[in-house]
């Protein structure tokens, strides 16, 4: 595999990872927190004394964002190592 193909595949994988993470973030923050909040309040369980939709709007989306940051870090380290762009491989 040539270096140019390697870089192109790396950026393609990186872009798809970013699109996936942004889609999850959009679904959780806008979907669960705003668009589906009333449905979640009526049809789901409660977290403490708060309905689930309210909890997702206030706390759940923030927790999900932090988890997505950790997932992104872990995934990018794996991608870097796979394509040789980590500290041990070639430089970008």
Image (cartoon, rainbow, N blue to C red):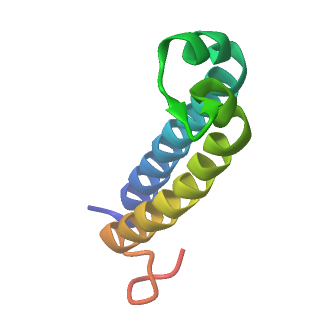
The outermost residue toward the left is 1
Q: Foreground residue, 60 or 19?
A: 60
Q: Which quadrant, please, contains the N terminus?
A: bottom left
Give x and y (percent) for residue 13: 42, 48
**Number of residue marks:** 0
Q: Foreground residue, 27 or 47?
A: 47
Give x and y (percent) for residue 70: 51, 63
Q: Splitting the image into 4 quarters, where does residue 27 fall?
A: top right
**Residue at image location 64% in from the left, 41% down from the top:** 61
**Residue at image location 67% in from the left, 45% down from the top:** 59
Q: Which quadrant, please, contains the C terminus?
A: bottom right
The outermost residue toward the front is 49
**Residue at image location 42% in from the left, 70% down from the top:** 80
Give x and y (percent) for residue 73: 51, 66
39 to the left or right of 29: left
46 vs 16: above or below: above
Give x and y (percent) for residue 16: 47, 40
23 vs 10: above or below: above
74 vs 26: above or below: below
Q: Foreground residue, 22 or 40?
A: 40
Q: Splitting the image into 4 quarters, where does residue 56 fall?
A: top right
Q: Splitting the image into 4 quarters, where does residue 47 fall?
A: top right
The outermost residue toward the bottom is 88
51 to the left or right of 10: right
């Amino acid at each position: 595999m040539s270096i140019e193909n390697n870089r192109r595949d790396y950026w393609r994988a990186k872009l798809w990872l970013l699109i996936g993470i942004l889609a999850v973030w959009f679904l959780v923050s806008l979907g669960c927190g705003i668009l589906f909040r009333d449905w979640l309040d009526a049809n789901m369980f409660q977290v403490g004394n708060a309905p689930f939709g309210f909890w997702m709007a206030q706390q759940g989306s923030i927790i999900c964002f932090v988890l997505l940051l950790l997932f992104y870090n872990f995934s990018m380290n794996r991608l870097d190592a796979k394509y040789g762009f980590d500290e041990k491989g070639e430089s970008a």
